[in-house]
Image (cartoon, rainbow, N blue to C red):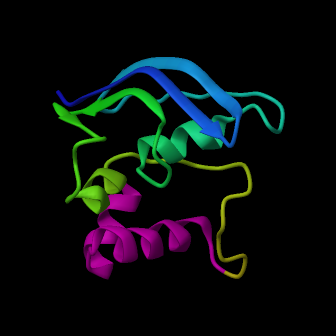
Amino acid sequence: MEELLAEGTVKRFGGVEVLAGLSVRAYARDVIARTGSSGSVRSTFLRCLNLLGRPDDGSIVIGGDELKRVRDGASLRRSRIAMLLQHFPRWAHMTALANVIEAAMHVLGLSWAEALERAQR
């Protein structure tokens, strides 16, 4: 079972430390929700996990790979961590199922039939 382990994650913007040693452990298929008011750095931490923003300190290990050391495979890592933001971009003219299918086709490279089967499951 693949494990995600983030220990002591620190993120700074200029001289302001916005993440001060955040740690979390999760396993494959875990669902974790973090709630809080706007500006409580939920998205900043998720961006660090997906390599969309690099942490300034601490370590993030996914399936035995420390993200600071992984140069190749960022897209693979991103495809294995799902994140749903508060204002998630979607196509309003499409159904929820169609949105999920579209994302799976573009992000995971699945065919329409594979994406449909996976979304229905």
Prevailing secondary structure class for the magenta stretch in the rendered image:
helix
* Image-quadrant location for residue 113: bottom left
Query: Residue 17: where, in percent of width, then height?
Result: 67, 29
Residue displayed at 38% across by 45% down: 81
Query: Residue 112: where, in percent of width, then height?
Result: 32, 80
Residue displayed at 34% across by 33% down: 29
Query: Height in image: 1 above or below 98?
Result: above
Quadrant of the drawing holding the N terminus: top left
Q: Is residue 60 found left or right of 12 in the rendered image?
A: left
The outermost residue toward the front is 15
Query: Residue 100: where, in percent of width, then height?
Result: 49, 65
Residue displayed at 71% across by 28% down: 35
Q: Which residues are magenta?
A: 94-121
Residue displayed at 65% across by 50% down: 85
Query: Residue 110: where, in percent of width, then height?
Result: 26, 74
* Image-quadrant location for residue 28: top left
Q: Is residue 26 found left or right of 10 in the rendered image?
A: left
Q: Is residue 113 magenta?
A: yes
